[in-house]
């Protein structure tokens, strides 16, 4: 199984919002490799042109530099598009606590602009990135749709609002929307740099460069780390899902639970390093434990993650070794 087994009409046109980012560029690449026509919309505020540069020469690939906060830009990008895979948003819980107004503009108004443009342009399916952060302060494990707690960061709130708009756009306008609650995605092209970098690429780069990584908190926080190819599959499956599944949100993880300190030592072993980490204060707004119940996505989307953590992390490490020299 996997995303390569999902097929679409030969002349299908996809728009990937945030297509120059980590997840978006992987979606663009997969679609081009499978023979489809792809438009990438990105303002390069967090995405990188280098992520899509190898795709630019393809006659089936178009890069549109534009901001989803502008409705007219969204409408132009969406003309004659069949499927929208919207990853355009600003991530990072800590940064959202520092910049709540900007997150409201980009993640809520921007996503709403994309949905409205999709409605106007008659798009078949609108798939968008949500987040496991919507579970907030819920302590129940595994995390199951319909059993959310109170959100504890502006970022999480933006994703919760996006899901409500997704529901309304299905109920009021008949637009088939599918929210994908990503659980700690990792893999090739995830940025290892900057103060808001995700832990896996950050740790790998620091260990490869002989630096001592810092773990925020005690390292006993747990995550459902999900390899990028599983996320590509989820997006493709959502595009093929029935209209009866539309208007809802789905957990997209690997269905596992790993402690951060164990991940750290796994990386040390894989990279041949013997470095004890530093420990820093817990990050405000972080969910303590995260583990996805993916039964709803299995049943309604046909999602069946091909990559477990061991396989995915091996591929990720290989990629970073080459990328980081």
Image (spheres, rainbow, N blue to C red):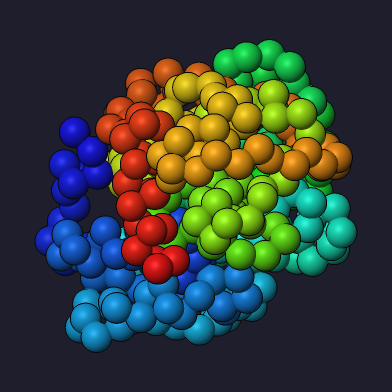
Residue under the image location 62 percent in, 14 percent down: 141
> Which quadrant of the figure contains the C terminus?
bottom left
Q: Residue 266 in the image: x percent, y percent?
A: 48, 33
Residue under the image location 66 percent in, 73 percent down: 69
Q: Determine whether, in the image, residue 269 is placed left or right of residue 314.
A: right
- In the image, residue 193 above or below residue 212: below
Q: Residue 119 in the image: x percent, y percent?
A: 49, 60
Q: Residue 272's image quarter?
A: top left
Q: Determine whether, in the image, residue 154 is placed left or right of residue 245.
A: right
Q: Residue 35 in the image: x percent, y percent?
A: 15, 65
Q: Residue 51 in the image: x percent, y percent?
A: 41, 72
The answer to whether one can see residue 9 in this image is yes
Instruction: Name the foreground residue: 81 vs 25.
Output: 25
Q: Determine whether, in the image, residue 275 is placed left or right of residue 94.
A: left
Instruction: Name the foreground residue: 215 vs 295.
Output: 215
Residue under the image location 53 percent in, 22 percent down: 257
> Which quadrant of the figure contains the N terminus?
top left
Q: Determine whether, in the image, residue 27 is placed left or right of residue 130.
A: left
């Amino acid at each position: 199984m996997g995303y390569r087994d999902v097929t679409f009409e030969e002349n299908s046109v996809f728009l990937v919002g945030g297509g120059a980012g980590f997840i978006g560029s992987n979606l663009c690449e997969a679609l081009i490799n499978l023979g489809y026509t792809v438009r990438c919309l990105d303002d390069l505020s967090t995405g990188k042109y280098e992520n899509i540069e190898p795709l630019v020469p393809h006659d089936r690939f178009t890069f549109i530099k534009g901001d989803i906060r502008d409705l007219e830009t969204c409408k132009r990008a969406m003309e004659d598009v069949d499927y929208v895979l919207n990853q355009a948003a600003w991530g990072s819980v800590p940064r959202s606590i520092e910049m709540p107004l900007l997150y409201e503009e980009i993640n809520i108004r921007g996503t709403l602009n994309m949905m409205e443009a999709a409605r106007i342009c008659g798009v078949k399916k609108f798939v968008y990135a949500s987040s496991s952060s919507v579970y907030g302060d819920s302590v129940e494990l595994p995390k199951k749709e319909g059993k959310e707690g109170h959100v504890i960061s502006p970022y999480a709130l933006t994703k919760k609002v996006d899901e409500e708009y997704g529901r309304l756009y299905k109920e009021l306008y008949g637009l088939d929307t599918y929210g994908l609650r990503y659980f700690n995605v990792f893999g090739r092209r995830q940025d290892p740099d900057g103060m808001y970098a995700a832990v896996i690429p950050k740790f790998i780069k620091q260990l490869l460069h002989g630096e001592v990584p810092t773990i925020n908190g005690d390292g006993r926080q747990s995550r459902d780390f999900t390899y990028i190819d599983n996320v590509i599959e989820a997006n493709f499956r959502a595009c093929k899902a029935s209209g009866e599944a539309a208007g809802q949100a789905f957990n997209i993880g690997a269905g596992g639970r790993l402690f951060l300190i164990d991940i750290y030592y796994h990386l040390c072993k894989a990279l041949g390093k013997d470095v004890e980490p530093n420990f820093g204060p817990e990050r405000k707004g972080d969910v303590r434990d995260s583990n996805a119940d993916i039964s709803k996505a299995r049943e309604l989307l046909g999602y069946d993650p091909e990559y477990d953590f061991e396989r995915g992390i091996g591929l990720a490490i290989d990629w970073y070794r080459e990328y980081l020299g």
